[in-house]
Image: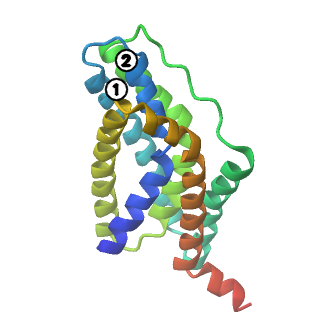
Amino acid sequence: MVHTILSAATAYLSTNIDYLVLLMAFFAQSQSRHKFWDVFLGDIIGSIVLVGGSLTLGIILHVIPEEWIHGFLGIIPFYFGCKLIFQGLGEDEQVQTNFSGWQLSRYVAFITITSCSADNVGIYTPLFASMQVTNEVYLTLLTFVVMLILIFLTAIILFHIPMITSIIEKYGRWVSAIIYLGLGSYIMYESGTIIHLLAH
């Protein structure tokens, strides 16, 4: 149980550290009086689409009989880690300042899906594919919900502390890269892929 929660929390953090900066950009540039709730709703919608897609792919890939083959999916987060180290981050999407209400929520959802789809699906899919029992899936989804709320609240707090924002912008890339590399290695080890390859 603790093992599943830690794995889910690590996976979520690895894909959302840099998303903190994007959330704060929404807060700063939106003129909506209820911008926090509007952005939160968009965040929820975007996350549901990304996690739902990853879970579906994970279930499809889970029919592969040999468990050690699942470990090759760990190459995906490993790739993203290397990409962050050698190429860095792409430019953040510009946030529309004139959006508010449901229009803002839809825009946040769209940006969340388009800017986070590659790494989120790449990280979550192998995580779901490596799970052996349904309870692990439920616990992971619950952990994702809790982490989504915590990340959002953290973004609100950091939004009012410019110095911390600059630190995240400066070092967030390296923290994400380290987590990606660790998660990829863990997935390959936990699935027995590394041991299987060494044995041959």
Q: Secondary structure at mark 1?
A: helix
**Which mark is on residue 112?**
none
Disc 1 + disc 2, Cβ < 8 Å: yes
Residue 118 in sight here:
no
Mark 2 surroundings within 10 Å by alpha-carbon count, few (fewer than 14), some (14 through 19), many (20 or more): many
Q: Quadrant of the N terminus?
A: bottom left
What scheme was used to colour the molecule?
rainbow
Number of the label disc, if any, that sits on residue 104: 2
Q: How far across and how far down the image is residue 119, in percent?
A: 57, 47
**Crowding near pointer 1: few (<14 within 10 Å), some, many (20+)?**
many
Task: State whether residue 185 appears in this view.
Answer: yes
Is residue 12 positioned above or below 63 on the image? above
Q: Residue at x 42, y 25 (%)?
A: 108
Q: In x, y percent, where is residue 168?
A: 50, 42
**31 lies left or right of 87:** left
The residue that appears at 26% across and 26% down in the rendered structure is 37
Identify the residue position indicated by label 1 in the image. 39
Residue 191 spot, x, y in % from top left: 54, 77
Task: Residue 18 in the image: state x and y as whole percent.
Answer: 51, 41
